[in-house]
Amino acid sequence: MEEEEPQKKMSNRGNNTGGGNNSNINSSNRPEWLQQYDLIGKIGEGTYGLVFLAKIKSNRSKSIAIKKFKQSKDGDGVSPTAIREIMLLREISHENVVKLVNVHINHMDMSLYLAFDYAEHDLYEIIRHHRDKVNQAINQYTVKSILWQLLNGLNYLHSNWIMHRDLKPSNILVMGDGEEQGVVKIADFGLARIYQAPLKALSDNGVVVTIWYRAPELLLGAKHYTSAVDMWAVGCIFAELLTLKPLFQGQEVKATPNPFQLDQLDKIFKVLGHPTVDKWPTLAHLPHWQSDQQHIQGHKYDSPGLYSVVHLSPKNPAYDLLSKMLEYDPRKRITAAQALEHDALVPSQPGEKIVNYPTRPVDTNTDFEGTTSLQPAQHASGNVSGAMGGPHVMPNRSVPRPMHMVGMQRMQQQSMAAYNIANQAGMGGAMNPGNIPMQRGVAAQPHQQQQQEGRNGDARISTTEIKAFLSLQQCIA
Amino acid sequence: MATDFWTSTHYKQLLDQEEVDVVHSLDKERGITLEDFKLIKLHMTNYIARLAQNVKVRQRVVATAVTYMRRAYTRRSMTEYDPRLVAPTCLYLASKAEESTVQARLLVFYIKKLHSDEKYRYEIKEILEMEMKILEALNYYLVVFHPYRGLSQGLINDSYRMDLILIYPPHLIALACIYVVCMLKDKDNTAWFEQLRVDMNSVRIQS
């Protein structure tokens, strides 16, 4: 057989052009697939690579986030992170999970691009906005809606035997303007994996979950862990939504490759009290609990003060739910499915005021190659027309947009009104794109009273109904 | 969904035997017959298994790799995608997908050890380039369901010597294996199979 020839030729071509990856790449050099997008700019950066905001040329109203994976330098090909993300997101589909719309490969420089539906907001930015800009708590109604949608997506993942393993506010996206406005999307599946019948102990994947959101069983070195690690992270995020501060803000010791982080454990123990083998029987078997008696077992904290930290009365159902998410024993920790049925997530009246969240900053001076032009990076708010901005600039990017929370599908249609409409506190009189008065809830009020008690009926409503309702609301407004 | 076979992309992509038994036009031009096509795939299945033994990965990784290789050739020609490069690359990709990554340089080491023939010798860079082409050829669908789960492995491993995994759901392949074992041991299983209410035709065809 002589199959090598074409193959060899192809790799030669790769050799010759792959090196031409210099700073001055103009669009004509770009692969064909790239031509379908208008690049707006860079919106994020991580260990995996860069994230760009782009528009589809054929449909200018559609924004796409393109995640570019760096080439691995040590000759290991497509990063396992990218493989996990592609593998899982090609299989699953849920309204509270980010949607992978395309995968592109650039054979010239062996780079890989994942294209997602763009989400304007994320919980990290929303929390920061409330803490640093409006200086006001997120209202209970919005917190509930976010939490319910997050749990809804997570329940879907867990019932498909998928653990996310990296839940944190910056990975929980919220859709901006458009059909799905206010819909929460779980993103970043770079650490996610299927945990049915694993070939190796899960701990072989190395350290998972960002330290502040890391469950105690991970911190104590558990070899095998379960989807309960995600629920711990949800608990931490829930508390953060309430107080606008990370619940357990431990100092990370970066040097250690293991998940054990003494300061993080200490922060947890201070709030929740010291775990005991009585309440958490398998605790005794965890490697770091056994090996580091002096430090871990030596500290004794026994005044659990979670309710005072989150400013909730111990009788508040929200407090009950939170404490069940932050249960030490992973086997007793509440599951996503159970949490969705919890009393704390019973529908309530929406807030009346609206917060306009700022749009994501876009660095318009960075191109797909990650090359930055000489001008200093500009940030989007009010100032998008940078070097490359030109015709791509969306006129309303500078205007903070109001966000509406949807979700809460288990409620009856009429009471959905309470959830779909305006929410949010703060910034009275803030602008919105059409200067629309924000009292969208008023029309729906009459339905609410009769439906408030209906939550245990067969009350699920479809996404289509929610969307139909949303657009109806927009028409009325 | 990632772990429900009936909603998986694996299920949605199942093919008919006639769709699998198509020799790519480029290969036909070079005189490769359907018999050659099947034999080359069988040969590459063995090659993947032998490489896997050396780099010490589990049987499921082998099964996934073979599935990738067989799937790739429902869409790509052997002329453009040399099986001697595709086979180790599929093992490489499968090891990542099944969370038991094997390093490319280790594969290259064992390729050289197993084959003195120049035509098998590919370098790391070529494997990495082919990895991306295989990803594309698979249309980025990487989740594969296998008929294992507690069944004796020998016969099931043999099922990967054909294209069964591209055509039948894993449970039918597993049943066919049980059927074959019963036949070989002269056990009458008709009643048991009747209770299962499966399509015995598909079981017999496989057997």
Image (cartoon, coloured by chain):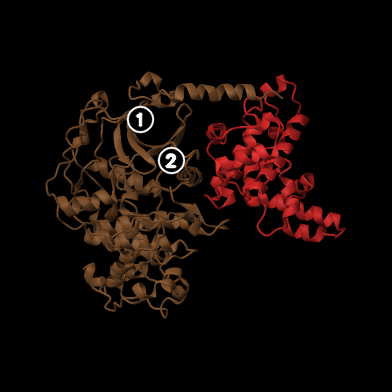
Chain shaded brown: A
Q: Nearer the viewer, residue B90 or A173?
A: B90
Residue at 63 percent of width and 47 percent of height: B55
Q: Residue A100 carries which label?
A: 2
Locate residue A110 relative to residue A398 in the image: left or right: right
Residue at 77 percent of width and 57 percent of height: B193
- For the N terminus of chain A, give its image quadrant: top right
Q: Where in the figure is residue A445, as x and y percent of width and height?
A: 23, 56
Give the answer, above or below, for where B81 lies relative to B96: above
* Residue B24 in view (yes/no): yes
Residue at 38 percent of width and 67 percent of height: A216
Q: Where in the figure is residue A259, as x and y percent of width and height?
A: 40, 60
Quarter of the image holding residue A198? bottom right
Q: Compute the Cα span from label 2 to label 1.
A: 19 Å
Q: Chain B is drawn in which colour?
A: red
* Residue A447 in view (yes/no): no
Q: Where in the figure is residue A151, as x and y percent of width and height?
A: 38, 58
Badge 2 density bin: few <14, some 14–19, many ≥20, Cα 10 Å: many
The secondary element bearing badge 2 is classed as: strand
Badge 1 density bin: few <14, some 14–19, many ≥20, Cα 10 Å: many
Dot 1 falls on which chain?
Answer: A
Type of amino acid under label 1: Phe
Most distant residue in the right direction? B186
Q: Residue A368 carries which label?
A: 1
Residue at 24 percent of width and 29 percent of height: A393
